[in-house]
Image: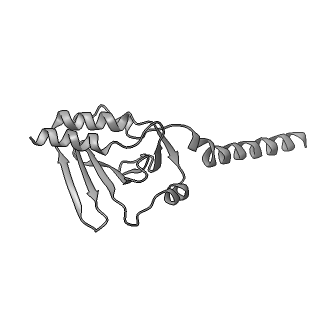
Amino acid sequence: MKKLLYSSFAIVLVLLSIYLYKGFIYYQIPFNPIKQYASEPNVDFYITKNLPDGDGVNAKCEDANTCGLILEYLSNLKLKPLKDKAAQAMLNYENATYYNGALRVNESEMIFISDISIDTSNILRISSSITGFKDGYYEIVDSTFDYNYIYGLINETEK
C-alpha cells in the first residue's frame, strides 16, 4: 500500500514539474533558435518593410560576407520566449510599419523572422520549416531589433 502511495505521489510530482516547466520556467530561460545556424556557410537573407498603406519595400542580400554578418547579428540577439497570447497583446498591426525577413540556410531550409513592428521592435516571431525548430514569439532582452544596421549592411553591398 505504501509503494502505491509513494509511486502515485512521484507521478503527481513529475506531472506538476512538467506543467511548471512548460507553463512558466521555459519562458524565463533565454534561448535563441538561430544560434545553432550561426556557422552555416551558405546563407541568403531577405527583408521586407511593410508600410501601413499596404506597400512593401524589399531588400535582398546574397553576398556571403554580408549575410554572414547579418546571421552573426541575429544569432547574437539575447532572446527570451514569449507566450503567443502575450506577444499578440503587445503587437499593434493597425497603421503600423513592420518588418518580415527570411534566412535561407543550406539552399533549401528557411528561417522566417516576422512581426517586427517599429513600435515594438523588441518583439519578433521566429519560425521555420526545419524539423525540431522552436517556433514562436521571442522578446529581445537587452536591446531592440536594429533594422537600420541590417539595411545599412545590405546597402553597402549594393554599391
The answer to whether residue 119 is visible is yes
State the residue at coordinates (44%, 46%): 122
Quadrant of the snapshot with the N terminus: top right
User: Would you place residue 45 above or below residue 86 in this image?
Assistant: above
Residue 6 screen position, x and y as percent: 84, 40
State the residue at coordinates (85%, 40%): 3
Q: How many marks are shown on the rendered structure?
A: 0
State the residue at coordinates (27%, 56%): 49
Quarter residue 40 falls in: top left
User: Would you place residue 143 above or below residue 136 in this image?
Assistant: above
Quadrant of the snapshot with the C terminus: top left
State the residue at coordinates (28%, 43%): 148
Residue 84 screen position, x and y as percent: 52, 56
The answer to whether residue 43 is visible is no
Of residues 99 and 18, the one drawn nearer to the viewer in this rendering:
99
Q: Is residue 7 left or right of residue 114?
A: right
Residue 83 screen position, x and y as percent: 54, 52
Of residues 32 and 9, the one drawn nearer to the viewer in this rendering:
32
Residue 65 screen position, x and y as percent: 18, 33
Q: Is residue 88 left or right of residue 69?
A: right
